Amino acid sequence: MPCRALVVPTPQPGGENGARRGRIATLSLAMRGLESLSPRAAARGLPLLGVAFVAGCSGAGATPAPSLPPSSSVSVTLSDAGCAPEPAAAPAGEVTFEIHNSDGDSVSEVDVQHADGGTIALQQNLVPGRSSSLVVWLDAGTYRVSCPGAATSAYTFTVAGTGAADWQTQPLLVAAVTQYVAYVRQQGSLLQQQVQTLLTAMQRGQLTRARSDYATARVTYEHLEQAIPDASLDRAMNGLAGNASSPAQFTGFHRVELALWQNDSTVDGLTAATGLATEADSLLQDLSGLSPAPGDITNNAVSSLTNAVSTRLTGEEESYSHLGLLMMQADLDAAEEAFQCVRPALQRSTPLVVSQLGAEYATAQAALDAVSSGGSFPPDTSLSPAQTRSIAGAFDTLAASMSKLAVLLQ
Amino acid sequence: MNRRTLSRRRFLGEVGVLGASVAAGGALASCAPAGGAAATTDSEISAQTVPFRGTRQAGITTAAQDRLAFAAFDVVTSSAQSLAALLQTWTAAAEAMTQGQLVPGGEINPSYPSPDTGEALDLTPGSLTITIGFGPSLFDSRFGLSSKRPALLQDLPPLPLEELDPASSGGDISIQACSDDPQIAFHAVRNLSRLGLGVVAPRWMQLGFGKTSKTSAAQATPRNLMGFRDGTRNLTSNDTALLDQYVWVGEDDQPWLRGGAYQVARRIRMFIEEWDADFLQDQENVFGRFKFSGAPLTGVVEEDVPNFAAVDSDGDLVIPDTAHIRLVAHEQNNGLRILRRGYSFSDGLDPVSGGMFAGLFFIAYVRRPAQFISLARRMATDNLGEYIRHIGSGLFAVPPGLGPGETWATQLFS
């Protein structure tokens, strides 16, 4: 099967369902003469997005930044006698154990454990004279500080109250969640329409149109995939042939992709497309119950970015259409939207993080831009090793930075 | 309790971030007081801890450990400030890891990744050493370091027996991690690489599974993959005068490098199937030593000093003029010495020939790169050349050790 050149789907004049997202939406705008807008601004300025989303995730936050939870310090002097924490209690939240081995010859380890012995964190190899610290997040409850080998090897440590302000009392975090949920639901609604459009094109035997509709729907799916509450639904809609227990179990997007690109057939994939339409209905239902915590928003973005590298960039997904780079753009857009949702909450407490993420996002976008030409992406099989490395490095860097945000959003 | 509801990472909240990498659920036996970690005594820990700070960087004349993880990095940021910040972070992380402690850098919280990746938990310090070096390309115009470039830090010239792959050559920064335990060495490089995301990117990496040189007189001479003892006459930590003469950079170089050394890294492929078909006596003539005893062909035991003048009854040199030990011997090179610290490697099969892709990851420490260049050129007529090819290369300037409070950033930038 020769590689096919990827052509970005031609925008439908008037956008019959107003449903093009992300890269495709951006490009279609550019083609209409809005080149003066930056791609991101253009995407955000589209009237296609829900009002709540546009207002929330890209608007300036006027409400105060959330306060970070308190941090307490506990001193632990390790000796052959034991490792009594001082004080032996702290409010819930971040707790820093400052550990020093004074003269313990037969002890060299301090563990912070749940009451049942499950280890939360530990520091080893603390020979006499050595100091170290452990920073742990603890909810209210009873814990143990233990030092194997000491005369007294376990001490009770009590954590009281809710030291961390509940995010639901913080307007910026509530807004972030509200806007993120609105965004995901809106994508779910779009997906429902787009899958229906795809099905119609296939029923009419319009192969070229169906391929374009497939790409459109896939981009939307990428935007919401990480928020899907039911993993089995994700598997049904987005499973790969190799993961299906039998050929008959191979359904969803990639079965349609196989039909449209490998078999050049709209008939072959009709069953899968019909199934997709039903599944998109279920998905929209499921999304009505979506209730993420603020940290879920950014951790979902991390998953978008890491999956982009591990499955899209490698060509594992989109193995028939080779649309992997378009999907990576969708993943990056999804991460960017997630970031925009929490950005107001982060801006005042950790502005450096916000500016660093902005720069890393720009680097990732530039890495993708470097391989796109005239607004269309080449097949994901066409990258040079240096281009692949550059994109992977930029995505991994952004993912690592975003992985540190959840802790700031509690 | 919000973090308990995290949708895609829920399991982490249930078992604790670090515990999750050790065992599922609550069955954290290896972390419990009765587990293996507690069985290690302080004296064992101390015996397996190499001091991180000192006059010299550890990992040069300190006793060669059995395992290596080596990586060359390119700096991908354009900000000297970011690079300096990373070097500071790396110093703290390297110091902690060499002491057998977790990578510092933030709290342990179920809703975000742990600062330490975890695979060295429950292990001893493992004699870990982490040695940093800076390549010629770091001193271009990007970071304002051009005035600090050591004059001798230039790309190596073309040399005999080489067919270099750019994919395993060069780099702005080198990290040599050596340990008794391969997992500890790998953990060190992996975590430094992770901390460097966005600032540096790994350019190439090499694992070594067995040391091929001794750097301490107390160590036995190991064998390389050709089956011969390697490094019999290597410099060791006891040779202080020779080390000053041939390894440690003196007052004639950049102030920041004085007391450091140049590190030459060469990835050397051995054609081991072809070597294995060579008859024993020819192999011994290639090296100039007996394979099993390690003695020079003019001697009986390994430590015997080779007699390069000895001839047999036909008047031929006993140690042939193409023998490896003759060509590189200090007696034949105006006394020139180098400190070798190499490792055997195996990286699967050669995709073309199906042969084992294996060899020697050669590392040498020298006061001047010209020492290595001179010996490498001597090997143009070395019969060993029939069986080896240099396929990767790097030259790095290795600063001296860190004093109290110093970091690799202050060393390079101030």
Image: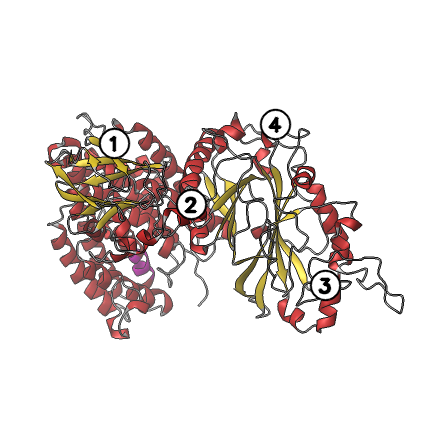
Residues rendered magenta in the picture: A208-214
The vertical placement of A317 against B240, above or below, is below
Q: Mark 1 vs mark 4: give the one in front.
A: 4
Disc 1 secondary structure class: helix
Q: Is residue A10 visible?
A: no
On the same chain, marks 3 and 1? The answer is no
The vertical placement of B17 against B76, above or below, is below
Q: Which residue is mark 1?
A: A346
Q: Which residue is mark 3?
A: B289
Amino acid type assigned to the residue bearing label 3 in the image: Arg
Amino acid type assigned to the residue bearing label 1 in the image: Leu
Q: Mark 3 vs mark 2: give the one in front.
A: 2
Q: Which residue is mark 2?
A: B46
Indicate the position of residue B408 as horizontal and vertical percent values.
49, 33
Amino acid type assigned to the residue bearing label 4 in the image: Pro
Indicate the position of residue B52 as horizontal and vertical percent values.
47, 39
Mark 3 or mark 4, which has the lower sequence index?
4
Q: Quadrant of residue B357?
A: bottom right
**Chain letter for the residue marked with disc 1 in the picture:** A
